[in-house]
Amino acid sequence: MDIAIFNAQAAILSSSFLNFIQKISLASKDVLDIFVVAVLIFFLLILIRKTRSLPIFLGIILLGIVYVVSIYLNLRLTQSIFNALISVILIILAIVFQKELRRFFEMIGLMGIKRKAAAPEENTIRTICQAIQYFAEHKIGALVVFAGRENIYRHIEGGIILNGRVSLPLLLSIFNTASPGHDGAVIIENNIVRRFAAHLPLAENLDAVRKFGTRHRAALGLAERTDAFSIIVSEEKGTISIARQKSIFPVANAQELAVKLKDFFEKKFPQKNWQSYSKRIKENLLFSVLSILAAFLLWVFFTYQTSVVQRNFTIPLEYKNLPPEYVVDDSDTEEAVTFFSGRESDFKLLDVPDLKISVDLTNLKVGWHRVQINKDAIPHPAGISIVKTDPESIRVHIAKMNP
């Protein structure tokens, strides 16, 4: 392509983009609108990161881009297919993302709920790590669960409520092979053993637990559905593993386990100080920027849609700048058909019942006159242009009022 032609096309695109940006005006309600959508998108991005649904989400975005391009280029066949299948696609997405949608609404609900859960004391973490190290050395199977910000109890069945403070003798007695509840899971919140002998949901990803037993599959099942942190000790190998964020990770020893636990509690239940807030802001800065940008683009798309339509309205005429001693006693017509062109969203701002076409009669005397209808004298939103009026001029007769 010739460089001059390329530069000319680039200049045209740049000019069109600048003109479009100049037309955008944000009212206070628009800012609030964008903020609300940005918050929803932010939680959606957090959920995608937790559930690792990024490939599916990218596929949805790609389909959305194709749909937008089809609207912009007026690809009627593509638009017809999307319009016909959009309800079916929404139902399919609701089925595919059933669990993710439930977690999304739970995350939104947690915004207004003050959780009593908090990070356990240093001594409690030390006690738990000592117990886990003991179980690993003696090849005693164990499963310990720490709840995060999300509700885990709707995924748990059975179990015995204990509400006892965490201690080494208590944990050793629960997972004693002679104890009837040693095969279940222990649920710990704060510094309290809330429940033991609990049954967790089994993982759906069988490939990830093919080399492990039922405890590992149960821990992974809870990690697939919530943000919980689970510790598993294998009674066959004496190894320590943790299940979190839909995955299972090996842990070398109690010292590494303590680091993992502290990191988990710092992220889920941070201390209320400036350093914790700044750390969370830095961690989620990219998602925050992307959420605001995505919300703004959606607002622009739905507010300034790319499809241009043309409409016409019959608008009455009104005369101005006529001296008080004169009057219009006859004319060709009292109204004119006006043709407007613009986006569908812009027409919502057009107040048709209050529209008037002002006809300027400055310096006109008694008799017949042909007056041009000035399109600029018709008030209309900035996003709408006036194509023409019918008629484009009228004949009016001016007479002098009787004294």
Image (cartoon, helix red, strand yellow):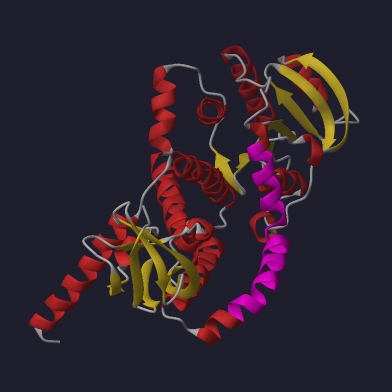
Residue 92 at x, y = what percent?
A: 70, 68
Side of 234 relative to 78 (left or right): right
Position above or below: 190 against 185: above
How far across and down, in percent of the image, does residue 188 sit? 72, 25
Secondary structure mostly seen in the magenta stretch: helix
Kindly identify the residue that appears in the image at 56 percent across and 26 percent down: 265
Residue 139 rendering spot, x and y as whole percentages:
71, 35
Q: Quick check: can you spot residue 337?
A: yes
* Whether residue 386 is situated above or below residue 105 in the rendered picture: below
Image position of 64 with respect to 51: above or below: below
- Residue at 19% in and 77% down: 9
The span picked out in magenta is 81-108
Q: Looking at the rendering, in which quadrant would you find the N terminus? A: bottom left
Q: How many numbered marks appear? A: 0
Lateral position of residue 164 relative to residue 89, left or right: right
Identity of the residue drawn at 42% across and 46% down: 292
Q: Which one is in front, 226 or 32?
A: 32
Q: Is residue 89 magenta?
A: yes
Residue 311: image x %, image y %?
Answer: 48, 74
Task: Answer with the quarter of the image where residue 14 lies.
Answer: bottom left
Looking at this rendering, what residue extends furthest in the left direction?
Answer: 4
Q: Is residue 351 magenta?
A: no
In the image, 124 versus 118, the foreground residue is: 118
